[in-house]
Every structure is written in structure tokens, then in C-alpha cells.
């Protein structure tokens, strides 16, 4: 299986892609509890996570609209991957996203602002805008809560459509290359270290 690794500071655009892209970063979305600011009946949070490009979260209420992702413990968050479809959603398509992170809903701080121009497909970007210590890529954000705020839509639209969202953790390089019996499956990785 091949992975696409983009430039460290760039936004990856998988134009026209309806299926989630195969990336090197692990998907940690299922570890969290998800909530949204508002939704229309039948277009709730489950539509963000179902992997179906035909379904979408449809906000319903005053702006700004937001998606809150709460983890049970502090996690390292490297990237977000969001699916948008300007050709179908028109003025419902987000144009400006503000990403906030913190230990709880009351202490969230802005970590990144992303501006998009007529996106169509999956867009993957670093959550942080701070370079890593080694200068190769961006640092992960360590947080209990991550919030994606739709600050503006194309053509000043009021409600919003988001067809998919994934939270990605950092790439783990903790297995030594010289280990002939390295644990590879998730079941075996549970017993890799002593707790």
C-alpha cells in the first residue's frame, strides 16, 4: 500500500475524490465523542462519520457553526481531513475554518485558520501552524477537545454542508528497524509495552 506524503507546510487537496484518501497518519476519529452546534433532521453528526460522500452534516441555526470533538484523554492531533463539495453544495460550502484546541470547552484557543477556495474532494491539513523541533513538518497539538468552526461560507451562505471529517494522529516511529518480530497488528500492539 502506498502513501502520499505532502510538503510539510502545504494543504493536501484530493480533488474530486469521494473516498477518504489513504494517508500515512492514523485515523483517531473513533476515539472521540462528537457533537455539532445544530443540524437538520436526518443530516446529523452520523453523516460526517459514515464514509458516504452522498450524505452530509447540514447545520441549522445561527452562525458560526461548529463541530466539537472530545477525547477521553489527552491525544496528539496532527491533521484534519475534511470532505467538501462546492459543485454540489454551492453557498453551503465552508470557505474559512478556524481550528481550536484545549483541555475543555471553556479554554479553547485558536491553533489554525484555513481559507478554502471552491473545494471539491478531501482536503487534509496540519492542525498546528508551528513547525516541529526537527524542522520537518508541523508539531502535533496535544488536546482533550478539538473544535472546527465554520467561520464563513462561500457566497456568504448561512447554513453549511460538510460531507466528511477525519482526525489524524502523528505517525508513530517507535518500532526499531532491527526488530525481527515487531508487533504489526492492533491486537498485538496492545501488549507491546508494560503499562
Image (cartoon, rainbow, N blue to C red):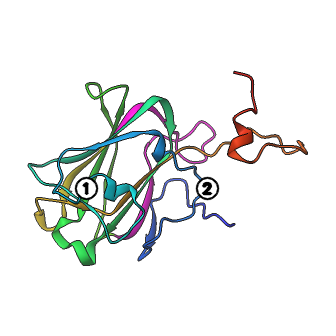
Residue 53 is drawn in which quadrant?
bottom left
Q: Disc 2 designates what residue?
A: 24
Task: Write the residue at 25% across / 55% down.
Answer: 96
- 18 lies left or right of 113: right
Judged from the image, the secondary structure of the residue bearing numbered disc 1 is strand
Task: Write the residue at 43% across / 45% down.
Answer: 127
In front here: 31 or 100? 31
| 101 to 107, vertically: above or below | below
Say whether disc 1 or disc 2 marks the residue closer to the N-terminus: 2
Q: Is residue 58 magenta?
A: no
CA neighbours of label 2 inside 10 A, class few (<14), some (14 to 19), many (20+) = some
Q: Disc 1 designates what residue?
A: 96
Task: Write the residue at 26% across / 78% down.
Answer: 87
Could you tell me if residue 173 is visible in this image?
no
Q: Which residues are magenta?
A: 120-146
Q: Nearer the viewer, mark 1 or mark 2?
A: 2
| Residue 77 rendering spot, x and y as whole percentages | 49, 40
CA neighbours of label 1 inside 10 A, class few (<14), some (14 to 19), many (20+) = some
Q: Is residue 130 magenta?
A: yes
Could you tell me if residue 83 is visible in this image?
yes
- 85 lies left or right of 41: right
Amino acid at each position: 500500500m502506498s502513501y502520499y506524503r505532502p510538503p510539510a507546510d502545504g494543504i493536501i487537496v484530493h480533488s474530486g475524490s469521494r473516498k477518504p484518501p489513504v494517508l500515512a497518519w492514523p485515523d483517531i476519529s473513533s476515539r472521540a465523542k462528537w457533537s455539532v452546534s445544530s443540524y437538520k433532521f436526518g443530516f446529523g453528526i452520523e453523516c460526517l462519520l459514515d464514509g458516504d460522500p452522498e450524505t452530509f452534516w447540514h447545520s441549522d441555526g445561527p452562525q458560526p457553526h461548529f463541530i466539537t470533538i472530545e477525547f477521553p484523554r489527552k491525544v496528539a492531533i496532527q491533521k484534519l481531513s475534511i470532505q467538501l463539495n462546492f459543485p454540489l453544495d454551492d453557498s453551503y460550502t465552508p470557505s474559512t475554518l478556524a481550528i481550536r484546541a484545549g483541555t475543555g470547552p471553556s479554554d479553547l484557543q485558536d491553533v489554525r485558520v484555513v481559507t478554502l477556495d471552491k473545494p471539491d474532494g478531501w482536503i487534509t491539513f496540519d492542525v498546528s501552524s508551528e513547525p516541529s523541533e526537527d524542522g520537518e513538518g508541523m508539531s502535533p497539538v496535544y488536546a482533550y477537545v478539538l473544535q472546527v468552526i465554520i467561520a464563513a461560507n462561500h457566497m456568504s451562505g448561512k447554513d453549511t454542508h460538510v460531507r466528511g471529517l477525519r482526525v489524524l494522529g502523528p505517525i508513530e516511529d517507535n518500532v526499531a528497524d532491527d526488530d525481527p518480530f515487531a508487533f504489526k497488528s492492533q491486537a498485538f500492539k496492545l501488549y507491546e509495552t508494560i503499562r
